[in-house]
Amino acid sequence: MLEIRNLTKKFGDKVAVDDLSLTIKAGEIFGFIGHNGAGKTTTLKAITGILQYDKGEILIDGKSIIEEPLVAKSIMAYIPDNPDLYEFMTGIQYLNFVADVFGVSTAERKEKIDMYANELGLIKDLGENISAYSHGMKQKLAIISAWIHQPKLIIMDEPFVGLDPKASHQLKLMMREACNNGSAIFFSTHVLEVAEKLCDKVAIIKSGKLVKCGTMEEVKGDDTLEDVFLELEDDNA
Amino acid sequence: MLKTLLRKQMLEISKSIFVDRKTGKRKTKRDIITSAVIFGVIVLFLATSFFMLCMMMGQSCFDANLGWMYFLVVGGIAILMGVFGCVFNTYSTLFLAKDNDMLLAMPIPVKYILISRLLGVYLMGVVYSGIVSIPMIIVCYIYGSPSFVSILSSLLLLILITLFVFVLSCLLGFLVAKISTRLKYKSIVIVLLSLLFVAAYYYVYFNAEQLIVGMLTNGVNIAEQMRVWAYPFFAFANVAMGDGWSILTSVSIVAVLLTLSLWLLNRNFLKIATNTSGSKNKKRSTTDSKRVSVRRALLGKELKRFGSSAVYMLNCGLGSFFMLVASVLLLIKSADIINISTVLAAEGYDILAVLGMAALMMMAAANDITAPSISLEGKNLWILKSLPISEWQILRAKIDLHITITMPCVLISSICTTIALGLGWLISILIIIVTVVFVYESAIFGLLLNLKVPLLVWNNETTPVKQSSAVILSIFVGWIYVIIMAAVYIPLRLIISPMWYIVISLLVNLVITLLLWRCLKTKGVAMFRNL
């Protein structure tokens, strides 16, 4: 579903992502972990077409994000680390805007909005201006907008930040359900316990380079993910 | 503590002068000097205009021994100028500052935070009112007979004007804040109130000469009436004349008003600054779920942004309002205009049709909706970039917004203008087509400018809407272009008829528009991709 080949992104002289390659298959929840400034967000933004990169190739379901960006984006959804949404819209207006762009039918969008907004506890606030939303509410709205068009690939940057425990639990269920239905999820997180329990595969990035990648068992063995991560940080320090 | 806050406030003000908003780095010496020169030229231009007005008024008033009337009128203009320049900045400076939450969470008395913010408001008022009040004082020294007392009292009037501007700015800023927290369609209400203010301002401006002559003729009667019915204004006008009782009254009134407004702000600051909810929670509307095309969805989004921001509407869409007002005025004054035209034509100046076309283009150029539209995406840019829409669709939506807001008014105004000027049907159609083409031209030009110099990092939307180089360049280049187009015809009138000149203008504008369109589709799209 997602193939990253030799991705390199520089900001001036600084190499943010260095020759990174990854493959994520349909049905997988893939965790992406690394220290602050390791290059996680840069990688995720490059995948979603927000950021242009210097070298390499990114294929979404076989389509290049550079050569066929619209086709690639039409099967993908992105939730950024800080959900800065249109504050001049109400929640429902924003969801309808996203649904219109993805061409979701009236009946389908109504069903999806009702279902996910109920599950995440946002249904009563959809008529409110986004400017009045808390961080968690914006995050919930971003999640609904990502799920509204049944994407094949979901890219999320720290999706659990700001969510209440119930919504956090609900998101985990939604992620598993989406993958059971054939979608793939690639998300970054600093909450290693969540990654350990939720992910099928995990990749660890340090200073732009991929230092470990594989199934959860391959990466952590008999240790905890936290131990492996801290050890890798020390090894390369 | 207050000292620390004041220092922080001064740092913030100086940052806007010495730090590049785009990069966050300190500006180079060259950039600082360039900005200072541009600012200086604008201030000098405005101050010179008011100086000329003061010279005209001062001579008449001081000759007629009606110095108080001079101070009443010019002082009033200084106050209007100060308040008009400050009111929206007051609202955003006081209540929308991004560091309000951070400061309120610290052990700082709320009144200290308020006082430190008010310093910025006061300084802004000093700059705006000073553009009128300083020329006022200089002219008073030229035509009046300056003595030690009159110099001191005129300086006191200067201070009183700045304080009165400060009081009014605070009260109006407070009113805007109240409207913003209570009303559903607050932006529209703010725009309407502002337009009323602008209309009143221009009414006084255009009738100034008549009003001044009337006041000079009836100066003694007016003075008597004011002494009885509007003593505070009379006293205010007499401060600079050195009248002790007037000074005492004016100082007392300003002191009381200042105390009251500070008390009011102190009482309400916390409540307004921490209010996050705009309108009442409305129920989900099922009609909201109707599916629309991507183009309509994008235009809808742009319209919502435009309609949600009074600052955006007032600064970038005011041309539409002017066009409608001008249409009505033109129809009313049609006979007078045709008479002037006949006289001009008899003297070899058959330029009315070209001037009409230029006036329409000038008003259309006042709408610079696309010029800040990319910058306004700011931190929301990721949304458009991550959606399956092409860069061209995004850019076209911004042009669509400009056309939606501007074109209906341009068409109404063009039709009214051609009727009022009594032009033939062929030349009328040509003028309408030229203006329509020009609307596209200015929309694309503004958008290209914004793509070239985007300002995506800002704390308050007034920064991209009012202070970005794309906005300033878009308006001034548009106006200069139109002025040149009209001016070129004056010598050419001897060899080209108005009809043919308009045909040439149409062709020129058409070619420029097509070139800009092509540039937007190629370079513009690439520039957006690299943002």
Image: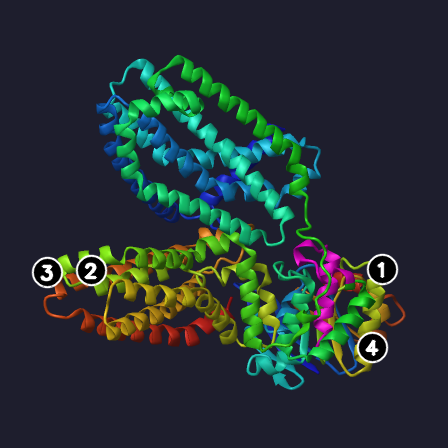
* Marked residue chain, label 3: B
Residue holding disc 4: A177
| Earlier-in-chain disc, 4 versus 1 | 1
Q: What span is colored magenta in the figure? A: A124-149
Q: Which mark is residue B487?
A: 2
Tell me the kind of residue under disc 2.
Ala
Q: As drawn, is B348 to the left or to the right of B229? A: left
Amino acid found under the numbered disc labelled 4: Glu
The disc label shown at residue A165, or none: 1
User: Does label 2 lie on the same chain as label 3?
Assistant: yes
Where is residue B183 drawn, in percent x and y? 62, 50
Q: Give whichever of discs 3 and 2 has the lower sequence position.
A: 3
Picture coordinates of residue A123, whole percent (x, y): 78, 64
The residue singled out by tag 3 in the image is: B346
- Name the amino acid type tagged 3: Ala
Q: Nearer the viewer, mark 2 or mark 4?
A: 2
Above/below status of B359 relative to B217: below
**Marks 3 and 2: CB-CB under 8 Å?**
no
Residue at left offset 37%, top offset 15%: B243
Secondary element at tag 3: helix
